[in-house]
Image: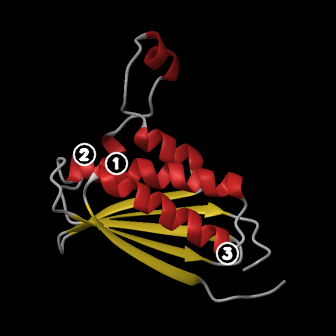
Amino acid sequence: MKTVNPKSYELQVKSTTENLSLIRDFIQNNALKRGVPQHIIDKIILAVDEASTNIIKHAYHSKPDGDIIIQLEFSFDKCRIILIDFGDGFNPSVIPQPDMPEYFEKRKVGGLGLHLIRTLMDYVEYHTDKGGYNQLTIAKKIKNSAA
C-alpha cells in the first residue's frame, strides 16, 4: 500500500447562491485530479452543496457579504471537507431525523439538507467555536488509486 501525504485545496467565496456553481466546480475539478470515481464525487458535491446552501440560508440569512471557506483534503482512502462560516450557529442535535413517509404524505418541501448530508457522507461533525465561527467537517471514504 502506498502512503501519501494528503493534498489540500482551499476556496473562499461570498455567501451567494451564484457561488454554488464555483463550489461544485472546485470539488469536481480537484477530486478528478486525485482520481476519485465520479459516483463518489457526485455524493460529495451534493453534500457540500446542501451544506453551503444551509450556510447561505440559515447562518447568513441570505445576506451576500458573508464568507464561506471550503477546505478540501485528500488522503489515500478518504476525502475530507471542512466548511467554515462566520454566521449564526445552530445545534444539529436538536434537528430530528425526518419521518420520510410523513414527509412525502404531507408533500413537504425542504428541510432534508442535514439528513441528506448524514446519509451521503461517512463522517459528519459540526461545532460552533467561541471565537466566532462555525465548522462543519464531513468525510467520504474513497478508493483512490491515483493518490
Name which quarter of the figure residue 71 lies in.
bottom left
Q: Earlier in the sequence, mark 1 or mark 3?
A: 3
- The mark that comes first in sequence, 3 or 2, is 3
Q: Secondary structure at mark 2?
A: helix
Q: What crowding class fits label 2: few (fewer than 14 Cα within 10 Å), some (14-19), or many (20 or more)?
A: some
Which residue is painted at 45% across and 34% down in the image? Answer: 97
Q: Residues within 10 Å of mark 1 (few under 14, many from 20)?
A: some
Q: Between marks 1 and 3, how big is the CA–CA gap?
A: 25 Å
Q: Estimate the x, y position of residue 89 in percent, counting from the top left.
A: 22, 55
Which residue has dot 3 on it? 34
Marks 3/2: CA–CA distance:
31 Å
Do residues under tags 1 and 2 come within 8 Å of each other at their CB atoms?
A: yes
CB atoms of marks 3 and 2 within 8 Å: no
Task: Label 3: state its secondary structure.
Answer: loop
Is residue 115 found left or right of 92 in the rendered image? right
Mark seen at residue 53: 1
Give 106 or 35, whichever is nearer the viewer: 35
Give left or right: position of 118 versus 41: left
The C terminus lies in which quarter of the figure?
Answer: bottom right
Place of residue 57 in the rendered image (x, y in percent of width and height, measured from the top left):
25, 45
Q: Residue at x 52, y 16 (%)?
A: 101
Say which amino acid is labelled 3: Arg
Q: Secondary structure at mark 1?
A: helix
Look at mark 2 in the image and give the residue it sits on. 57
x 67%, y 75%: residue? 34
Q: Which residue type carries mark 1? A: Thr
